Image (cartoon, helix red, strand yellow):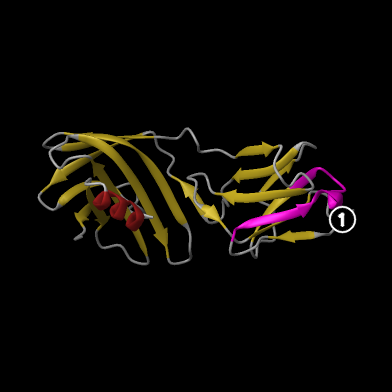
Amino acid sequence: MTIVFLTFGQLFGQDTTTYRQANASMFWNDYTFIKKNKSDKSGTFIQYSGTDDMQDWYGKGVFTETNKKYFLIFDTINNHNRIETVSSTGHSDTLYIKWFDWRGEQQKWFSIRFADTTKNKNIFRSDFLTGSVKIPKIELTSKNLSLYSFGSRGNIFDFFVADNIDEMNIFANDLVLMHTFNKRKETLKKNGKGFTTIGMWTNEKPTQFVIQQK
């Protein structure tokens, strides 16, 4: 994710700077600041962290800075499960379903099952190339469905399908692996190496973040 935004920043002439938590073992914790111009004192930011066991944490928002501090405001408006639907398409006999996490990253490995698996055990698996599940509507013996991630035993999200819906984009986090930062505001204190703030697994103590070379 960080690499994507750095590349976009370079393509469109934006200035990007990434800081990483120092002395991190078996995880990383990055803040990336994006400005239109290097001299700007405000812009957008992304905080992205991950562990070796494939868990990740994500946050984004806007920031302002002074000579001594960064002031961050996190955008939490999409931090919840939601569905976008489309009707009146050219495939009214088939339901197309795609899965995205809360930040909008498409997840291509998943399946859809009936919410009541005691009555219908059918499993509709995604096409790994397109990331879509296609369900013939004639096979929808129930309108109550559940989303499962690949290899998961428990369902991620239960939902209902109305008769006139042809396409669904589901935005839901797999709460075992996908996390959002539970904070609204944060202040980062600058120093000669980068800045300090409370890092991951630091017992709520400030820790050093250092600049990453591009």
Question: Where residue 36 sits: x, y (%)?
Answer: 22, 39
The residue closer to the viewer here, 23 or 123, is: 123
Q: Count neighbours of disc 1 (C-alpha within 10 A) and say few if under 14, some if 14 to 19, many if 20 or more.
A: few
Judging depth in this view, the residue of 48 and 183 nearest the camera is: 48
Read off the magenta span: 130-145
Q: Residue at x 26, y 45 (%)?
A: 33
Q: Position of residue 46 (x, y in %)?
A: 34, 45
Q: Is residue 143 magenta?
A: yes
What is the x, y in percent for residue 175?
Answer: 56, 50
Q: Is residue 113 above or below residue 36?
A: below
Q: Residue at x 33, y 58 (%)?
A: 3
Residue drawn at 60 percent across, 64 percent down: 128
**Residue 87 lies within the magenta run:** no
Q: Amino acid at mark 1?
A: Asn
Q: Which residue is mark 1?
A: 120
Q: Is residue 67 above or below residue 118?
A: above
Left or right for 186, reference 114 = left
Is residue 176 visible to us here? Answer: yes
Quick check: 109 above or below 203?
A: below
Who is closer to the viewer here, 75 or 141? Answer: 141
Residue at point 49%, 51% (across, down): 105
